[in-house]
Each structure stands twice: as structure tokens, then as C-alpha cells.
Image (cartoon, grey):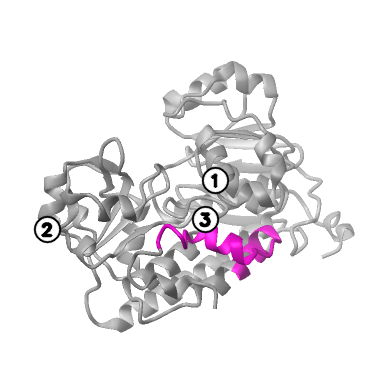
């Protein structure tokens, strides 16, 4: 669509609430595509209205040019939707660390120069720091105690839910694309995600037998925490056909990332263990520790470090379809997806970047996972 087509459209309105998204443009609730070019490069001259996941409506006179992100996945998600780091003004330190340690900082080096002291580890905002940046909008988790200090300081806040669903990811993408003036970018990203989701579900349904028990460690060093009920990790373990001991017959109480002791893990005896990217634990740390030697996943050497791409693959984000494929290949190594090629294709789409062989090895932790079963399937051909 040419830019001059935009002048013939009426007000763009984007409503995103409750984890679902509908993009409306000029045609009421017809569901037709918004008035921007398919590449997402068109300009939006009319006000942009967004209802966030608190149910609060924000209106911007024009696409935003300065965004501070506090939720950890938000910084890299914004960059992926935007295709650049030009409109990201600051981020949570954990977001910055993922960019530094992954490949996002290589693809978008400007991001590593941005402030990353805008909130404490528990997302409490450093209000004066944020206000000094004078952003158009601050992206924050929707808890009142996290949002109100920012709004009381006169800042515009876009509230996100943290309920660990794919619908949340879709909603975040839609809101970010809308406020950047690139609503069709959200449709493109969701279409790809939906396609991969359908294929993963179909493959899992077609196996006709239960998959392995898979335990995800959000933290391993300095105290054990695993993904329990209402987590995205529980969602994708079950998506690929596996089972999560933390939500099975002997479940952990509570939801989210829950602390536990070694004895509970020994009772569960998981067949596969995943180590997240929120600490430095690697498979060799478990293989070499006598405490874990009787666990099935250790005996069969099925302990894996989760990949780290443009963002960590363990929480929800723009690269989640790649996590589903990787985990499916881990759970069922005989049914290989050609993941390296999929990562390359996705990175071209998300970041306009062709990853090198060395970058693919880094993303997939080829070296760190080299002692684990069947991991050679992810090596360069």
C-alpha cells in the first residue's frame, strides 16, 4: 500500500484487552487490515488508540518515538516489532543482559548503549530515572503498585499482564505494533506464530503416545526454582506432548516459579531437564554433581541449556515458535525439524539478519550442550 492511500483512511483504532487483540482500521469492526503498508513502513497520520491489558485506553497523536520497557521480554520484543532499536530509550537490566549475552547486541549494537537502570530486579520503577528520559510511553507489568508510581509522576504507562499465555504474547505484539504505527507487522508475526503452533499441535496429536516428563529450572544455582502452574514453560512442555512433573500427580503448591528442594526432584525423577537462561547453570554442572546421579535425565544425559537468541527462549516472546520446535526436537529426537534453517529464516523475518554459523552455535548453546544426548542434531551440517 502506498503512503498516499493512508490519507483516504479514517482514524486508526487498535483495541487490545484481556489477552486478545483486534486490529481495526477505517471500517468499524470489519476486521480488515489496518491502513499501513504490508512492510510496516507506512505512516499513520491519525490518532492511535490502544486499550492495554488493564483495560485502560491510551491515545497517541502519532506513532511513539521513545519507549521505556520494564518487563523483561518487552525490550527485545519492541525491537523485533520495530525492526530496529531506534525507538527504544531504556530497559530493565535483565533485558540488557540478555541482549549482551545473546546476539541481539550484535544485530542492534545501539541497544547496548541504552540506559538499563530503570527498575529494580522486582520491576519496581526508578521513577526519577524514567522521568528524566521523557518517554512517550513506559511499558510496565500491570500490577497497581508497579504502575501507579509512574502515572503519579505524569508518565503514560502501557500495562501488560504476566499470565504466561500465548494470547498475552499476541496481545503484546499487537500493542507494540500499533503504538509504533506498524499494525500490519503484528498480523505478520501472529500469522507465522499461528502456523507453527498448529503444526506443533498436529505433530503432538499424531504421535499417539505420551512424551517424556520435562522439568524446567528457572533457577538452579543459589536455590532451585521450577515452572509450576500458570507458566509459559508449562504451556509449551504440554504443547509438544510432554508432561511437567511440577503440575502432574504430585504437583507443587502455588503458581509461577516455585522453590523446591532436591528431594522433590528426586521423587519426580524427570526424564528431561531444561536449564533456563536466568542463571549460569550448564548441563555439566548437573552431570558432575553426585547429588543428581540417580535422576533419569542425568543417567541418560538429557539435560539441556535452553537457547538464547534475540531474547531468552524460555519465557514468552517473539522467538517462542523456535522454542517449541527446539523442545519438540529434544523430546522426540527422531523427528527433527531442521532447526538451524528455521532459526535462520525466523531471524531474517524478525530482524532482517542472516545469522552466521558461529551465531547459530551460540544461540543453540552447541558447546554447552555438546555432552547431552542427541544434541548433535543441531550442529552445522
**Closer to us: 109 or 280:** 280
Front label number (2 vs 1) = 1
Mark 2 touching mark 1, by CB under 8 A?
Answer: no
Give the labeled residue for mark 1: 101
Q: Horizontally, is 97 left or right of 218 in the view?
A: right
**Closer to us: 7 or 91:** 91
At mark 2, the secondary structure is loop
At mark 1, the secondary structure is helix
Q: Position of residue 161 (x, y in %)?
A: 44, 42
Front label number (1 vs 3) = 1
Q: Horizontally, is 166 left or right of 171 in the view?
A: left
Q: Quadrant of residue 150?
A: top right
Give the labeled residue for mark 3: 170
In the picture, the quarter occupied by the C terminus is bottom right
Furthest-right residue in this view: 4
In the picture, the quarter occupied by the N terminus is bottom right
Q: Which residue is at a point 64% across and 63% down the rendered structure image?
A: 355
Of marks 1 and 3, which one's residue comes earlier in the chain? 1
Front label number (3 vs 2) = 2
Looking at the rendered structure, which numbered label has been put on residue 249? 2
* Above-or-below relation of 116 to 351: above
* Above-or-below relation of 274 to 70: below
Q: CA distance from mark 3 to mark 2?
A: 31 Å
Of marks 3 and 2, which one's residue comes earlier in the chain? 3
Q: Which residues are magenta?
A: 344-369
Q: CA distance from mark 2 to mark 1?
A: 37 Å
Amino acid at each position: 500500500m502506498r503512503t498516499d492511500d493512508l490519507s483516504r483512511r479514517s482514524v486508526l483504532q487498535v483495541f487490545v484487552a484481556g489477552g486478545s487483540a483486534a486490529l481495526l482500521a477505517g471500517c468499524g469492526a470489519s476486521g480488515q487490515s489496518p491502513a499501513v503498508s504490508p512492510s510496516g513502513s507506512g505512516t499513520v497520520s491519525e490518532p492511535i488508540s490502544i486499550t492495554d491489558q488493564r483495560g485502560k485506553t491510551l491515545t497517541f497523536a502519532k506513532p511513539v518515538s521513545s519507549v521505556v520497557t520494564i518487563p523483561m521480554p518487552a525490550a527485545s520484543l519492541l525491537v523485533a516489532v520495530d525492526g530496529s532499536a531506534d525507538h527504544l530509550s531504556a530497559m530493565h537490566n535483565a533485558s540488557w543482559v540478555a541482549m549482551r549475552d545473546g546476539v541481539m547486541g550484535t544485530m542492534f549494537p545501539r541497544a547496548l548503549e541504552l540506559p538499563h537502570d530503570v527498575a529494580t530486579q522486582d520491576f519496581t520503577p526508578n521513577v526519577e530515572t524514567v522521568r528524566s528520559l521523557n518517554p512517550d510511553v513506559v511499558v510496565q507489568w500491570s500490577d497497581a503498585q508497579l504502575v501507579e508510581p509512574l502515572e503519579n509522576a505524569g508518565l503514560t504507562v502501557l500495562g501488560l499482564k504476566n499470565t504466561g499465555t500465548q494470547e498475552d504474547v499476541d496481545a503484546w505484539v499487537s500493542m507494540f505494533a500499533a503504538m509504533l504505527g506498524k499494525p500490519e507487522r503484528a498480523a505478520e508475526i501472529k500469522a507465522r506464530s499461528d502456523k507453527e503452533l498448529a503444526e506443533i499441535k498436529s505433530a503432538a496429536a499424531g504421535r499417539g503416545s505420551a512424551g517424556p516428563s520435562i522439568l524446567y529450572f528457572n533457577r538452579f544455582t543459589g536455590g532451585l526454582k521450577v515452572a509450576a502452574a500458570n507458566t509459559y514453560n508449562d504451556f509449551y512442555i504440554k504443547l509438544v506432548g510432554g508432561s511437567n512433573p511440577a503440575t502432574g500427580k504430585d504437583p507443587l503448591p502455588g503458581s509461577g516459579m516455585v522453590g523446591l528442594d532436591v528431594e522433590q526432584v528426586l521423587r519426580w525423577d524427570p526424564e528431561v531437564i531444561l536449564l533456563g537462561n536466568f542463571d549460569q547453570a550448564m548441563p555439566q554442572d548437573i552431570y558432575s554433581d553426585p547429588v543428581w546421579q540417580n535422576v533419569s535425565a542425568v543417567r541418560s544425559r538429557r539435560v539441556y541449556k535452553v537457547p538464547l537468541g534475540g531474547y531468552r527462549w524460555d519465557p514468552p516472546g517473539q522467538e517462542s515458535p523456535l522454542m517449541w520446535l527446539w523442545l519438540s526436537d529434544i523430546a522426540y529426537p527422531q523427528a527433527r525439524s531442521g532447526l538451524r534453517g528455521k532459526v535462520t529464516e525466523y531471524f531474517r523475518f524478525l530482524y532482517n539478519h542472516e545469522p552466521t554459523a558461529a551465531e547459530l552455535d551460540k544461540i543453540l548453546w552447541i558447546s554447552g550442550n555438546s555432552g547431552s544426548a542427541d544434541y548433535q542434531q543441531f550442529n552445522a551440517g
